[in-house]
Image (cartoon, rainbow, N blue to C red):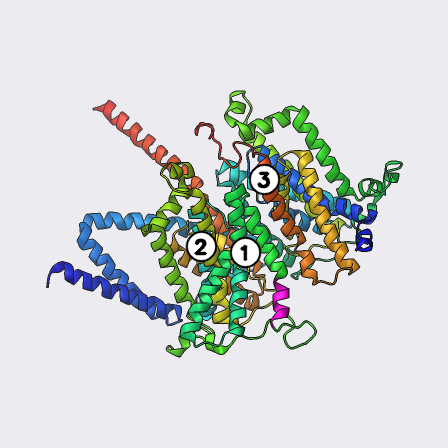
Amino acid sequence: MMETLAALFTPQLVEATVRLAAPVILAAMAAVVCERSGVTNIAMEGIMLVGAFFAALVAWYTGSPWLGLVGGAAAGALYSLFFAWAAISLHFNHVVAGAIMNILAFGLTRYLMMVAYGRQGTSNAVARTLHDYKTAIPVLSDIPFIGKAFFDQTPIVYLALLSVVAWAWIFKRTRLGLSIEASGEYPMALETMGRSVVKTRYTAVVLGGVMCGLAGAFLSIENSNSFTEGMTDGRGFIALAANIAGGWRPVGVFLASLFFGFVDALQLRAQGLGVIDLPSELFLVFPYVATIAAVAGLVKRSRPPAAVGKDFSVEGGGD
Amino acid sequence: MRPDRARAIIMTSAAAMAAIGSTLYLASYFAGGLLALAALAIFGFLRRSELGAEGFAAASRSMLKAAAVPAIGIASALAIGAAVMLATGYDPVASYAALFYGGLVRNWHISVLNATPLIFTGLAISFGFKGGLFNIGAEGQYFVGVMAATWLGLKLNLPAPLGVPLVFVVGMLAGAAANLIPAALKVKTGAHEVVTTMMMAYAIRTLSPMFIRANGGDPASSAHPYATAQIGERLWLPLFKDVLPASNYRLHVGVLVAVAAAFAVRFVLDRTDLGFKIRAVGHNPIAARTQGISTARITFATLLISGALASMAGVTQVLGLDHRMFQNLNAGYGWNGISIALLARNDPIAIVFAALLWGVLDAGGQYMARTASTPNAIIEIVKSVILFLLLAEVVYSSSGAAIKRFLAGRKAARAASEGGRS
């Protein structure tokens, strides 16, 4: 038994934890930013899917995974602009708008698969992936056990880690962070101060879209080399859970996302080692069960932003 | 004979005509549509005698107006779909011709078969919406219904009149049980049902291959690599063909069960104490609580009933059509049920029509992909656009208000200028 555990808990497991957490971190940060600004965003699954598709398409067409990364982020931004328009300007119920965006994303990527590649299922493989640009940061990557996990990684993993630091700083120190927070807690106050709630929420949703697009790009051109229909596999919703479990704060959400990455890595590793002779489905189901457990156990400790999910209009008195 | 008695008799026979006509139509006996229309005319006539000519005209105008919004929305979505096809090099005229010929005429039975599970999942999700809950994981409960029906179908050897209701009851209990954890968490900790029911759905789908292997599916064999064994023939749902020989050999009576369920849901929500409480909690939980309603208990019940309704889709599918469970079952009935519920604005009867629309688009889309070789994913896009346009009520109402303001302004200006002259 101890040997089994020792075989499981290796530096490789830590490395895989951070790597597999990356898309969840990015999408969960998007959830933090959107929800703190007052917009409930369940469209992240769809935004990620669109980002993953366009990242793979651009990387395949141009041969450059870097352009693919930009393409994925831009597609995520544009698609979430559409979501923002529906939820903020057209005053759709946020959850309903998000559900529609998810359904549309699924159909859109399926249709564009046929248009671009002439088939369903999996896209053409890209020539180079971002995984080829794995870079070790000198000195830091030599820290035992966790050095390789955090400082010898691929580009989007670094971006995911950076996004945590960036958002923690933005929320603590900048006017943008303050505006986002006010827009989610007490939007009328922000409006009274002469700042636009609508603009703030648009900004938050589109920035969230960039991060979801990057999360999608991770799936299609960093962790693999092609786009597969429905490849997000519920990660957008896991990110939503990470956001709740982490208490709507960047650092807490980062830790929650790492937990999901860990569960995912453990699942892969336990399955790969074959140390436990059980059907593979019992491992694959781990992340979903862990998500339910995390949401169940941690949800009471924190409070969502007061005005999250509430429609805003100045005429409506703000709530 | 007293007039109200005569009236009751006419009403009843018209209702029977409508039911028979619609059933015939569903079974691809299109002449049945005429019978349903005749029944509608009788209803209209009775209504006219009740309201008087003027009142009736006003009522029909407002009905036409209500119908205009969805009609315009669907037409605009089709136009957008045509624009997408043109932009990507497909022929929209040939595609739509194939779509509607395939969905409404040639493969109408497939449209009905598609609509059947969608009516159940649409009802399930809208039932949740009524109680202020979003059961986004109906897909999972659908799978549970499929598994329960397959399992019982393999074990049970009862005559249909006993067996079929039993499978439905057990399937519904299983579907309700699938929502037990999300419901308990929602009530105890406030964990959001969007996350929990969605994760349950993914978990159930992930585990389902184990069920298939345990019930006759064998990846090593070539006979049933990805499906369970077939359930006993005694439990299969009757076919329309048994009485109406010209109807398709796969068309089972599940759609009638689904329509009955829609009426049952409407009755529960509109006419019972439980329905009133569910709507009260959905409308305003704080007000409901001050009225002495236990919101926790109602929330719990709503999620469980919603799960039971969604699982009926799976039970019907197994007993009526598939007779087994398939792996790689990428049904999407749960996800599409969300669209149906939204589209029908939670009206149980409208759900039947919305599900038929979706069924037609899916069946027609497949026919279109085969005959006009336009990718049927375009239908997914058209469906989302329909949903988007029909839900963007603010766009309509605000543009409508703007037009009204504009007209009122002109009228006022004219009145002012006329007033100035006299």
The front one of A169 and B156 is: B156
| Residue B78 visible in the snapshot | no
The front one of B190 and B130 is: B190
Q: Are discs 1 and 2 both within one chain?
A: yes
Q: In this rendering, is residue B272 above or below B223?
A: above
For the residues marked 2 and 3, what is the alpha-carbon distance in whole angstroms?
25 Å
Q: Which residue is mark 2?
A: B305
Q: In this rendering, is residue B3 above or below A96?
A: below
Number of dots carrying numbers: 3
Q: Horizontal and vertical percent for residue A62? A: 76, 49
Does A248 lie within the magenta span? no
Q: Which residue is mark 1?
A: B380
Label 3 lies in what chain?
A: A
Q: Which residue is mark 3?
A: A299
Give the residue type at disc 3: Val
Label 2 lies in what chain?
A: B
Mark 1–mark 2 contact, CB under 8 Å? no
Question: Mark 1 or 2 closer to N-term?
Answer: 2
Q: Are discs 1 and 3 both within one chain?
A: no
Mark 2–mark 3 contact, CB under 8 Å? no
Give the residue type at disc 2: Ile
Q: Horizontal and vertical percent for residue B224? A: 63, 74
The residue segment tinted magenta is B208-215
Give the residue type at disc 1: Glu
> In the drawing, does residue A76 fall left or right of residue B400?
right
Q: In this rendering, is residue B229 above or below B126?
A: below
> In the drawing, does residue A192 fall left or right of residue B1?
right
